[in-house]
Image (spheres, grey):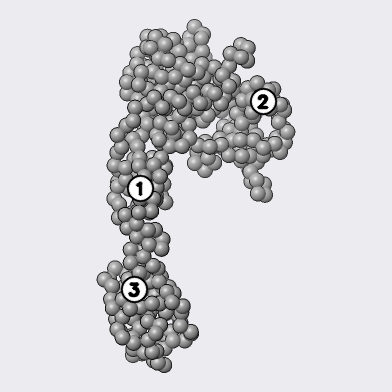
Amino acid sequence: MPPSALLAFDLALARVLALADAAPPAPLERVPLAAAVGRIAGAEVAAVRDLPPFPQSAMDGYAIDRAMPLGPWVAVAGRTAAGDPPGVLAAGRPHRIFTGAPVPAGADAVLVQERVVRNDAGDIRISSPLPAPGANIRLPGEDIRAGTPLIAAGTRLDWRHVAVLAAQGLAEVAVRPRVRVALLGSGHELRQPGEEAGPGQIFDSNRPMLAALLTAWGAELVAPPPVADDAAAVRAALEEAAARADLVVSNAGISVGEEDHVRAAVEALGGALSVLKVAIKPGKPLAAGRLGRAAFIGLPGNPQAALVGAVAFVRPLLARLAGETPPRPFLLRAGFARPHKPGRTELVPVRVAQHGAERWAEPAGPSGSGRLGTLLGAEALAVLPAEAGDIAEGALLEAFGFGENLG
């Protein structure tokens, strides 16, 4: 196929992301904080109260009025622990206080207990100069002020957001519904793990791999059983999947061979494909478009090609459908030299190593779109640009990680 018949990687990605623009908006859900991790905030959340909500002692010690006369020994009056209502400072007397407790009215500093000497009668003597005004007192709103925006819409929530929302007294949060993904696969040669494999047959690794990735990326799987590899069965499965899911992902069957039924079934069901072949390696036969109300992506069948299509196209589309910003590539230095013919964007599985202040990409294993062993050591896909010639060691490359740790 001449290069002009292939769609450039950037243009193909733009068309895939545009599929999310046609998706109807879904109503938000409210979930308890315990179920919020990994969900996408559906609306901005602003602080409803100051943190701290009242003047609060930062230390165990004694609340004082710095202007009070303090003799050699001073009797203590009053005691406030965390959770007690605020007290009132007695004239000329220190007030026993503990970390997190409300500072009594009239106090302007807290003496830490290590700076005083206490006798058997409970009186104290100050063993160091008085602290500065406001010392060891947390002021209302010094951490967070009421009305301050805390979480932007489209944020993927994690433990940090849960902590702040809980501190605000909020028991639940509005989130976008999970994107429902139907994952279809077919092939006469495929058997499922646990079944018997006969001569010429192999176990299906792609669907378990893709299901694991989709789940890690926050999707809700609508997982039909493996589809019989004939035109009628593929068409029926696609029609059902499009009715139940926001995104339909098929694996294999998107070329134009006699045994490839997916593309023909999509078109027979009235689907519109805006991407058919992409100038990438591996994974050139990649299809994308719409199938009824659902977005559709057809991935190639070789394991590394399916992985490339999932990371480069499915993951950003999934993020956009969820109302989240698609993950951005990060930069690595090439820890290898590699011949590269201009014309196609190549995505190479790599390990990531830290050398000094920079991260470097090291080959994860031998090349080959059908190799699975290479993926055991892979942490990211390094991008060799379509316009680039041979890649020199030390060249700066973009890369896409597989999960949260590497982008």
Q: Where is residue 367 shown, x and y percent of the image?
A: 64, 26
- In this view, the residue farthest toward the top is 258
Q: Which residue is mark 1?
A: 45
Residue ID for mark 3: 103
Q: Nearer the viewer, residue 150 or 182?
A: 150
Q: Going by the picture, which residue comes out furthest to the left?
A: 85
Task: Indicate whether 268 appears above or below 377.
Answer: above
The answer to whether residue 122 is above or below residue 263 is below
Residue picked out by circle 2? 387
Q: Identify the element where label 1 is drawn.
A: strand
- Amino acid residing under circle 3: Val
Q: If you read the primary sequence from the N terminus, does the residue marked by circle 1 or circle 3 appear first? A: 1
What percent of the width, then of the height, locates residue 39?
38, 40
What residue is drawn where x is 42% and y is 88%? 125
Q: Residues within 10 Å of mark 2 (few under 14, many from 20)?
A: few
The residue under the point 37% across, 22% down is: 294
Q: On screen, 166 above or below 61?
A: above
The N terminus, quarter of image:
top right
Q: In the image, is residue 235 above or below residue 115?
A: above
Left or right: residue 259 versus residue 269 is right
Q: Earlier in the sequence, mark 2 or mark 1?
A: 1
Mark 2 belongs to which amino acid?
A: Glu
Dot 3 surroundings within 10 Å: few (below 14), some, or many (20 or more)? many
Q: What amino acid is at disc 1?
A: Val
Nearer the N terminus, badge 3 or badge 2? 3
Q: Quadrant of residue 19?
A: top left
Percent position of residue 208, x then y: 45, 28
Q: Position of residue 267 (x, y in %)?
A: 42, 11
Q: Is residue 293 visible?
A: yes
Q: Please, what secondary structure does the residue beneath circle 2 have?
A: loop
Q: Image point 42% across, 15% down: which residue?
A: 272
How far, Cα to Cα, is label 1 from label 3? Answer: 29 Å
